[in-house]
Amino acid sequence: MSRIITVAAAQMGPIQKAEPRSVAVERMVRLMERAHKRGVELVVFPELALTTFFPRHYHQDISEADSWFETSMPSNETAPLFDAARRYGIGFHLGYAEVAHEADETGNVRKRHFNTSILVSPEGDILLKYRKVHLPGHAEYDPKRVVQHLEKRYFEVGNLGFPVIRAPMGGLDGINMGMMICNDRRWPEAWRVLGLQSVELVALGYNTPSLNMEAGGFEAHHLRVFHSHLSIQAGCYQNACFAVATAKAGTEDGAELFGHSIIVNPQGEIVAMASSWDDELITADCDLDMCNLGRTTIFAFDKHRRPEAYGRITGQIGAVAPEVWKKA
């Protein structure tokens, strides 16, 4: 009997800086209602889905940014999402900014800030938490930039690794599920760590601008979308898994986000794609048995991986120049 789950990428249009969380939550609840009518069993929302993408806004006093962060999950403001999950029998993935009081790597308990996502069961239980590892952007205000990208100012590098959980979802007794956030998708190491845990379904949220012209050079709009999709398709193919990759889209606080949410199968094929810059639900039936072909043939890790040759991947950060050839 096939292991099929019906999933949805719940793309969201822009959330403006002045809009309260209640506006975003109300929109997400409506998307869950639509998902229920279509027989969806798992809904994936974007990165930082409760607010505008606030890292584009500079606060000299970093504590002033705390208003963008959640101190608990669920909270009074996000409780309607958990209620909707129970009402409709739908699991969901949510990206948000998290503040936590916990020990750092030195053992010092302090207030810490993370770009976080959670996976929630249809009963409203938090099954898994992930904190973004690959933070792009910069930490200080850059006067040369038209739009700031201050993730390195407001977030710490995630400290939970890339976890995978096997848990019931929809009508299935167990699915191997993991998460990524935005820039993580561009790093093959992230996909491979999930793949080495036999991940079957990756939930991925992002907020990606349409233009990348701040550091010199030019990356055309169509290539921005292509590079995003290329990363996800390659990750799914090389690790024999599905991905539900959900964006924010449209013009948010004057900055354009490119959307193009997709659902990808283990062959690397896009099986559904958003076509608007607004709230939009795209769905697909994912037969998880499709994961078996790749992981038992080309990507049978136990037969073909050679970690003894990959030492540079974990032993080195920046690129180094190779040895210069000299004529003997």
Image (tube, rainbow, N blue to C red):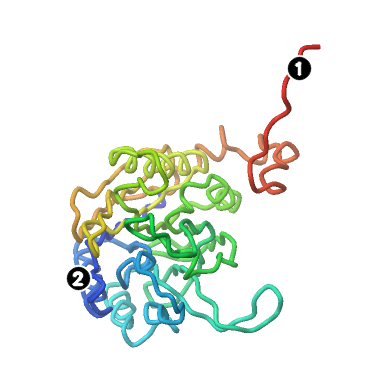
Taking the image as shown, residue 59 lies to the left or right of residue 134, namely: left
Residue at far top of view:
328
Numbered disc 1: secondary structure: loop
Q: Write down the residue under mark 2.
A: 30
Residue 160, horizontal then vertical, whole percent: 59, 66
Name the kind of residue labelled 1 in the image. Lys
Q: Residue at x 55, y 82 (%)?
A: 111
Mark 1 or mark 2, which is nearer to you? 1
Q: Residues within 10 Å of mark 1 (few under 14, many from 20)?
A: few
Q: Please report whichever mark, 1 or 2, sits nearer to the chain's N-terminal start.
A: 2
Numbered disc 2: secondary structure: helix
Q: CA distance from mark 1 to mark 2?
A: 66 Å
Residue 47, horizontal then vertical, whole percent: 37, 63
Residue 91 in view in this figure: no
Choose top left, top right, bottom left or bottom right for residue 249.
bottom left
* Observer-nearest of 45 and 319: 319
Q: Measured along the vertical axis of the image, is residue 226 above or below residue 134?
A: above
* Observer-nearest of 225 and 238: 225
Q: Residue at x 39, y 66 (%)?
A: 55
Q: Quadrant of the C terminus?
A: top right
Name the kind of residue labelled 2 in the image. Arg
Residue 17, horizontal then vertical, whole percent: 26, 72
Q: Residue at x 28, y 81 (%)?
A: 80
* Observer-nearest of 91 and 94: 94
Q: Which mark is residue 326?
A: 1
Q: Which mark is residue 125?
A: none
Residue 307 in view in this figure: yes
Residue at far front of view:
143
Q: Residue at x 51, y 37 (%)?
A: 294
Q: Measured along the vertical axis of the image, is residue 255 above or below residue 309?
A: below
